[in-house]
Amino acid sequence: MSTAMNFGTKSFQPRAPDKGAFPLDHLGECKAFKEKFMKCLRQSTFDNSKCRLQSKDYLECRMNHQLMAKEPLEKLGFKDLVDPPSSQTQKDSKP
């Protein structure tokens, strides 16, 4: 009698991680950004609102190195830290 019951061979289908879960940075490609963010957190008694720029830079690094899915920074809560498009700044600078 067989202990394994195979009702059909289903192959494993990998899928992208859910938001908030992403691969570890095994090669240390974003280590410097992480260290700056962690240093900022320690200096601000872990008030992450004071370290938003470092957080944005760290997430941008992770996205650029395919360590997380690319998302618009506006969707990640950094709308106020994103430069407006060049066409918008030209419109704003006209009298």
Image: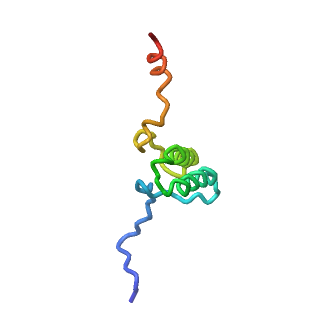
The front one of 81 and 75 is 81
| Quadrant hosting residue 43 | bottom right
Question: How many marks overall?
Answer: 0
At a point 46% along the width and 12% down the height, the residue shown is: 94
At a point 44% along the width and 16% down the height, the residue shown is: 91
Residue furthest left as drawn: 7
At a point 57% along the width and 46% down the height, the residue shown is: 61
The front one of 34 and 5 is 34
| Quadrant hosting residue 13 | bottom left
54 vs 10: above or below: above
Residue 59 spot, x, y in % from top left: 52, 47
| Quadrant hosting residue 73 | top left
What colour-coding does the image apply? rainbow
Residue 35 spot, x, y in % from top left: 61, 55
59 vs 18: above or below: above
At a point 49% along the width and 57% down the height, the residue shown is: 46
Residue 62 spot, x, y in % from top left: 55, 49
- Asked whether, in this view, residue 17 is left or right of residue 32, the answer is left
Residue 25 spot, x, y in % from top left: 59, 57
Residue furthest top as drawn: 95
